[in-house]
Image: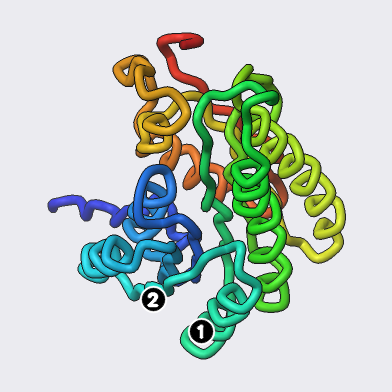
Amino acid sequence: MARKTARRAPANEGLRGKVALITGASQGIGLAIARALAAEGCALVIAGRNEPRLQRTGRELAAQTRVLPVVCDVRDTGAVHSLCIAIERRFHRLDILVNNAGIGHSNLNVGKLALEVWREVIETNLNGMFLVTHCALPLMRRGSAIVNNLSIAAKRVFPGSSAYNASKHGALGFTNTLREELRPRGIRVIALLPGATDTAIWKTLWPEAPRKKMMSAETVAASVVRALTLPPEGTVEELIILPGAGTL
């Protein structure tokens, strides 16, 4: 008599049906995370400033899951408020927030860095993270998770990148505070600190950077999925991922 083969459940069944918001989702690490979460069965809200690129991403992901593209500049309080209203109307809740939107700046020492550039980087990378989190928290319940993409620059200093370094160091302080505040509510907060990853931001930070030594965005996204699927009694507080090739 033939033996019946046991049917294996999907490896990450815990993410199926979850609702995830990813900012800066139309390229780079944000897009890779969106694709990875779609593959796990999450419904997605993807946000970004570039509407044509966002719509293309939405059409791609819609082949796998429910997806709501929303044009949003995370620096704009009104736009962030509209984003959260759209999430509530469509899905009524939010299970995963990935604060990924961020920008860099040209390699310039402090004495040559324009105040306007400083302000734009801080507004996007730090204030934008606060605005989105502040607006999204009422939609989140026990068992939810927040992933803040900070970069290894949150712990290391790179000359010529003062605004970027400052924004990421500040975002780490924000993330660590948020984690302690949300522990009683059962909401996990993960600081994602990837090292050099082959994304478009290097065109601004360091155009001549050796891309072949970098990680892929998909490697970072796979690590995020693993962190999100830990049993509820455990959490990853800091997720540091570095290229296997070593320091660039």
- Tell me the crowding category of disc 1: few under 14, some 14 to 19, or many 20 or more residues within 10 angstroms, Cα based: some
Classify residue 227 by image quadrant: top right
Q: Is residue 236 visible?
A: no
> Any mark on residue 68, and which?
2
User: Is 19 displayed left or right of 170 in the figure?
Assistant: left
Residue drawn at (80%, 54%), measured in percent from left and top? 178
| Quarter residue 131 falls in | bottom right
Q: Position of residue 26 (x, y in %)?
A: 35, 56
User: Sequence order check: which comes first, mark 2 or mark 1?
Assistant: 2
From this view, report whether residue 71 is shown above or below residue 151: below
Number of callouts in the render? 2
Q: Residue at x 67, y 28 (%)?
A: 162
Three-letter amino acid code at disc 2?
Leu
The chosen color scheme is: rainbow
Image check: 248 left or right of 112? left
Q: Name the residue at 47% across, 28% down.
A: 205
Q: Secondary structure at mark 2?
A: strand
**Foreground residue, 56 or 22?**
56
Q: Position of residue 242 (x, y in %)?
A: 51, 21
| 109 on left or right of 91 | right
Residue contact at pointers 2 and 1, CB within 8 angstroms: yes
Residue at the location (78% across, 48% down)? Answer: 174
Res 86 label: 1
Image disc number at residue 37: none
Secondary structure of the residue carrying numbered label 1: helix
Using the image as rendered, state which of residue 175 and residue 9 is in the foreground.
175
**Marks 2 and 1, how far apart at CA:** 9 Å
Please determine whether, in this image, residue 33 is positioned above or below residue 241: below
From the top left corner, tell me how far across and down residue 94 is, in percent: 58, 73
Residue 84 percent coordinates (x, y): 58, 78
Badge 1 amino acid: Ala
